[in-house]
Amino acid sequence: MAQTASNMIPLGTLAPNFKLPDTISGKVFSYGDLRGEKGTLVIFMCNHCPFVLHVIDEIVRIGQVCQAQQIGIVAISSNDVIKYPQDSPELMKAFAAKHQMDFPYLYDQSQEVAQAYDAACTPDFFLFDKQNKLFYRGQLDDSRPSNGIPVSGYDLRQAIDLMLQGKEPPEIQKPSIGCNIKWK
C-alpha cells in the first residue's frame, strides 16, 4: 500500500474557489455555496483508498459535528476514473449512500481543484476559518489501516474546537498519509 503525505501549504492561504457537480444531488456547487458561517472543511478523498475506508465512519461523524456547529463540509474526489473506474461519479453516489454521508461529494474531473488546493493524498483535510483562511491542514489522527491505533479524529477535532473558540491553530500539524491522488 503506497503512502503519500499531504502537502503542508501555508496557514492563512485563502480557500480556492471551485464549481463542481455533486454526485449525490446532481447540483453544481461552488465553495461559496458550501462555506459555513463559522468555517469550512474541504476533504479530498475517494471510494477505493484503504486509508479513506479506514476512517470513513469518523469522517461522517465529524461531518455531523461540523453541520451542527455551522461549519460547511464538502468531500471532493479528483481521481482519474479512466484508470480507476471504482471512483466514478456513479459509484461515488453509491459510496455516499452506503456510508450515510449527508454532505456533498463532488467530482473534480479536470483535477484543477485538487491542483488549486495542492491536494496530494486521500484523505487530505483542509479546514478554513470564517474568513476562508486556512486554519488546519493535515491528518485526521494517528490511526492508519495497519498500525492498530483506534480512529479518533483527534487532530482534526482539536483544530475544529480551537477554531470555534477563536484560538490560534494547533502548533503541531502532521501531514495526512494516504494513497496518492490518481493523476491523469
Image (cartoon, rainbow, N blue to C red):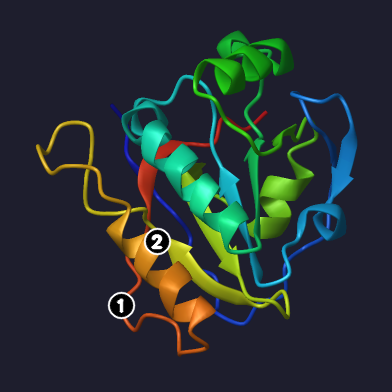
Q: Residue at x 73, y 80 (%)?
A: 131
Q: Which residue is mark 2?
A: 156
In this orientation, does residue 87 appear? no
> 10 Å neighbourhood of mark 2: few (<14), some, or many (≥20)?
many
**Horizontally, is 114 left or right of 7 in the view?**
right
**Farthest-out residue, front:** 68
Whether 33 is drawn above or below 102: the answer is below
Q: Residue at x 32, y 39 (%)?
A: 3
Q: Residue at x 32, y 63 (%)?
A: 155
**Horizontally, is 112 left or right of 2 in the view?**
right
Whether 31 is drawn above or below 49: the answer is below
> 10 Å neighbourhood of mark 1: few (<14), some, or many (≥20)?
few
Where is the N terminus found, in terms of image quarters? top left
Q: Nearer the viewer, mark 1 or mark 2?
A: 2
Q: Quadrant of the rendered structure where residue 132 is?
A: bottom right
Q: Quadrant of the rendered structure where residue 21 is?
A: top right
Return the disc, 1 or 2, that comes first in the chain's sequence: 2
Residue 164 location (% of width, % of height): 52, 77
Residue 78 location (% of width, % of height): 66, 34
**Farthest-out residue, left:** 148
Q: Amino acid at mark 1?
A: Ile
Where is the C terminus found, in terms of image quarters? top right
Q: Which residue is mark 1?
A: 172
